[in-house]
Image (cartoon, rainbow, N blue to C red):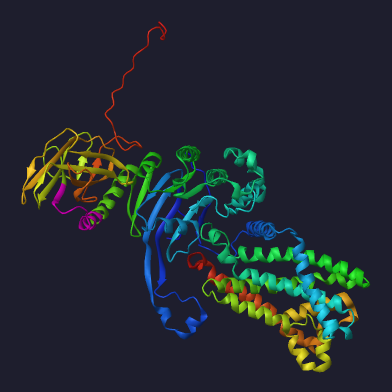
Amino acid sequence: MNVVPFHARRVQGPVAIGDDPRRFAQLVLTLAVTNWKLRFFGSALGYLWSLLRPLLLFGILYLVFSHVVRIGVEVEKYPVQLLLGIILYTYFSDVTGDAVESLVDSESLVRKVSFPRLVIPLSVALTATFTLLLNLVTVAAFLAIAGVEPRWEWLALPLPIALLAVLATGVGALVAALFVPFRDVRPIWDVVLQGLFYATPIFYPIEAVADRSETVAHVLMANPLAQVVQAARHLVLGDGAMSPAEASGGAQWLAVPALLLVGLALLGLAVFRRMAPRIAEEL
Amino acid sequence: MSQAPPEDVAVRVAGLCKTFRIPHEQTHTLKERALHPLRRASYDELHALRDASIDIRQGEFFGVVGRNGSGKSTLMKCIAGIYAADRGEMWVRGRLATFIELGVGFNPNLTARDNVRVNGIMLGLTPKQASARYDEIVEFAELTDFVDLKLKNYSSGMHVRLAFSVMTHVDADVLLIDEVLAVGDAAFQGKCHDALTAMSRQGKTIVLVSHDMSAVQRFCTRGMLVERGEVVAVADSSEVARRYHEVNYDHAETVASQAAAGAGGTGAVHILDTWLEGPTGERAETLRHGEFCVLRLRVEFRADVSEPVFGFVLTNWRQETVFAGTSGWDGGRAGRHATGDVLDVGFRFQNVLASGRYFVSPEVGRADRFGQALDYREAAATFLVEGAREGAGTVDLPLELSLSPVDGSVSSS
């Protein structure tokens, strides 16, 4: 027989990332696009929902906080700040919230095909990123209507967004891996997300906190999510919003949320890698 | 032994062990873990594979057979890299594609076009290849007119055709196929088998897990028998099929004795024993094809019975009824029998059965009240047939070939 000299490869078993980055990227993209198509399947307004959801939340919060509770009135460009906060938080909550059950939902793939396991939570994160990008278009339209002058600093916006993506994906991988053996990660995570919504300056500006107690503001800014939101606000509005360093009580304090962000992302990756070989049999 | 296997080995499995832990009480919540930290230690170990080793050569069509739960699928999943091995190592030469199930990742809410793309990419194609082969795949599945239909509107036959078509267009060098071909109608199975044979001719290595011994014998050049997580035999496919039937024989005996305990009937007659005799009149568990054999029942009458009817049903390992015979056919008179009489009943037949494992379920009934069983024993005896020509049927009939020219149709030269 005619023997073709194929390359012999040792079977490693299931891995988190694998040694073929090209295929990894192709799989993430393919699954993300599929998720995206399926997400709005059967709904009349389709993609519009991904825009409407945060906008409706915005409408409610805006009404409450500028007319009922009146925190908003003392802040410059409150609507812009509010919308930015909502959209960035929604992204974090979409990525991590959808990641929790992602491995279990993809059981038929995980148990029947061999592919790097991290593809699953990453594809969920990428789908949410598509939504985020669409939502940022709304923010841009909103900025134009609100009469905010375009600034060069806007070009730096991808940086905090990229950091947020790293944080959300890392935490997403963590909760996805933990959900396989511990199914009560779902309700726990829902509560954590709810708590984060209030612990992060979203509907209230960090300035409002700093006016009452600087210490509380500094503590709140230890949250990487708060840093990302504040950085985005500062880049968009300039002096209209406190810089993250100022809100944290000095640039040196930025190290805390930075370490937390890197630490959480690495922890998520490490836990996922450790669990990857057993995911298929424990589902 | 962590060196790459020689060049003609496509798949090497060396000393593979895989154990699953099955917790006694599934502890799925944090609270349970917190409240019962020690309970975690309590689990059963299921040794799915124990020290399995096999070399599959390039271009081989290799069959993997074994009973349900013997470890075949675990072996496939370990080679495929879906399960992590506990011990041992595996090597694969060339690109591997696994088919544990047809149409993995098919989503009913996507169109055939999208599903083919996703499925193809999951199975190892690049997005570019998946798009390029799309037309071919749909054409092979004979679904060109339905590509923009959502999959949920497909019939199950169309579904399977599409999935199989993707599978044949994922050009891997080594294919692991786990019983996916058991689905679909006869025409589809025929098409599957043709496609597999064609791939094998192209020099691809195919590893086929199957319960269908006739398929294994027809297609596979070699095979292995897995039993309780161990590789019991590696041999040419007919030998492996024979061993498979032998293993099932042990199993069948257990089944038979269990079934006998729960047999039906009024109790007026007891079937004491059921056995087969070879041409010499000796009891036999293996019968050669073509020989004259006798099926014998020993019955005891526990009541006075007049004109009983003796019958039996013969089933093969696929649980198909091959034949059902009765003493009533030839108008044979069985006479009157008093309480305490013991009778031997014989059915002589020429063995035209195909090779394989058979089961005999004897029955004694009453002629005057048709259908009332006096005694019935499910699978009371079993035997093996050997020496039949290889074929897919349930019988191997004696054939005589004749070729007779029809006048005028043959040229004079």
Q: Is residue B318 magenta?
A: no
> Which residue is at the front of the view, B229 or B106?
B106
Q: Which quadrant of the figure has residue B139?
A: top right
> Which residue is at the front of the view, B210 or B186?
B186
Magenta-highlighted residues: B255-274
Quadrant of the drawing holding the N terminus of chain A = top left
Q: Which quadrant of the figure has residue A211?
A: bottom right
Residue at 8 percent of width and 40 percent of height: B335
Q: Which quadrant of the figure has residue B46?
A: bottom left
Residue A61, position as x, y percentages in the image: 79, 78
Classify B258 as above or below A202: above
Q: Is residue B262 magenta?
A: yes
Residue B171, position as x, y percentages in the image: 56, 45
Specify whether B182 is left or right of B112.
Answer: left
Residue at 79 percent of width and 63 percent of height: A134
Can residue A89 be seen here? yes
Residue A136, position as x, y percentages in the image: 81, 67
Residue at 40 percent of width and 5 percent of height: B412
Q: In the image as oriented, which residue stretches furthest toward the front?
A: B368
Residue B68, position as x, y percentages in the image: 37, 56
So how many labels did they put on this image?
0
